[in-house]
Amino acid sequence: MKLQMMYSYLKADIALIEKELETAIKSNSLLLQEASTSLLHAGGKRLRPVFVLLGAKYGDYDIEAVKNVAVALELIHMASLVHDDVIDDAELRRGKPTVKAKWDNRIAMYTGDYILACSLEYMTNIENAEAHRILANTIVEVCLGEIEQIKDKYRFDQNLRDYLRRIKRKTALLIAASCELGAVAAGAEEQIHRKLFRFGYYVGMSYQIIDDILDFTSTEKELGKPSGDDLRQGNITLPVLFAMRDSSIISEIQKVNEQTSREEMKRIITRIKETGAIEESYAISKRYLDKAISILHELPSNRVKKSLLDIAHYIGKRKF
């Protein structure tokens, strides 16, 4: 089943949010407008707005109120992508030139900052102190995750705890906040939005681990960038950590840098796969996914719960 079919009843509301995103990034600066729009049109699953809407279904659902949260969270995600591409010196995202590739690092950083400011502007429409507290805390954690990613580049002696803390801040907490904030904005019971937060956190952890696996198992066409590019840019992900338990491959991995050729990367990817690191990484992803699904069993049964379950299964099985 295609992802969009899992929440097809939200189609009209998602289309509304897409229009709001277009409105949100409008600027008097032609350069900022063009750079922001290029990122928006690069595509994306819009998972965070979807989780906001699904979470809001557990309360008093009002799209005019909830859309502000959905737009704000997607803009935060977009801003983090622009900054990520600068940190990683990435030329492509989803098969299209990044903002830093089309312009330069300075334009990319200001574009990311501008998109983040647009996000905060949308949040001013929400008259809920708890929602603002959750969002502020999430932005702080995302920024810490960005700093940790810079600090950990090419640090081959990091451990599993370092990796899990980094992806928690980089990915999982924003997805968790999306699930929770939708419910908070719609006035859902506290026990509901707390459970939605935990569901989103576990799903987010699984999602990022799968992302890191796909960097080694998918084709360049599917990824929209060269296979193994995360490692070449110095990002030490779960499959790499597991592969380095095999002493025969450590020295080869530690030699990887931005100048490593595609032919050499293909050979190293094959070696990583031979260690069983991919299977071990899938097992960790499944543990997080199982925890997410177990939390769903505690929520009221309705079509929203079915959608959340379907999305969780989709994330665990996705190929790109």
Image: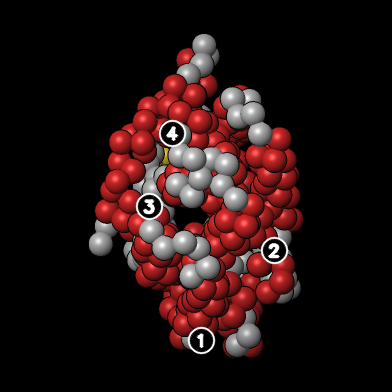
Q: Which residue is mark 3?
A: 224
Q: Is residue 136 visible?
A: no
Quarter assignment of residue 77: top right
The CA span between labels 4 and 2 is 34 Å
The residue carrying mark 1 is 275
Q: Secondary structure at mark 1?
A: loop
Looking at numbered disc 4 in the image, what kind of residue is underneath it?
Ile
Across and down, in percent, residue 23 comes to 44, 22
Mark 3 residue element? loop
Number of other residues with Cα within 10 Å of mark 2, as a class: few under 14, some 14 to 19, many 20 or more: some
Which residue carries the number 2 mark? 165
Is 148 left or right of 170, judged from the image as shown? right
Mark whose residue sits in front, 4 or 1: 4
| Residue 305 visible from this viewpoint | yes
Q: Tell me whether circle 1 and circle 2 mark residues in contact (CB < 8 Å).
A: no
The image quadrant where one finds the C terminus is bottom left
In the picture, measured across the screen, residue 302 lies left or right of residue 66, that is: left
Point out the tag, 1 or 3, that comes first from the N-terminus. 3
Residue positioned 39% across, 48% down in the render: 45
Locate the N terminus and report the quarter of the image it occupies. bottom left
**Residue at left offset 54%, top offset 36%:** 69
What residue type is disc 3 on?
Gly
Residues at badges 4 and 1 in contact (C-beta under 8 Å)?
no
Q: Residue at x 28, y 48 (%)?
A: 8
- The residues bearing labels 2 and 3 have C-alpha atoms spaced at a distance of 26 Å
Q: Earlier in the sequence, mark 4 or mark 1?
A: 4
Q: Is residue 203 above or below residue 177?
A: below
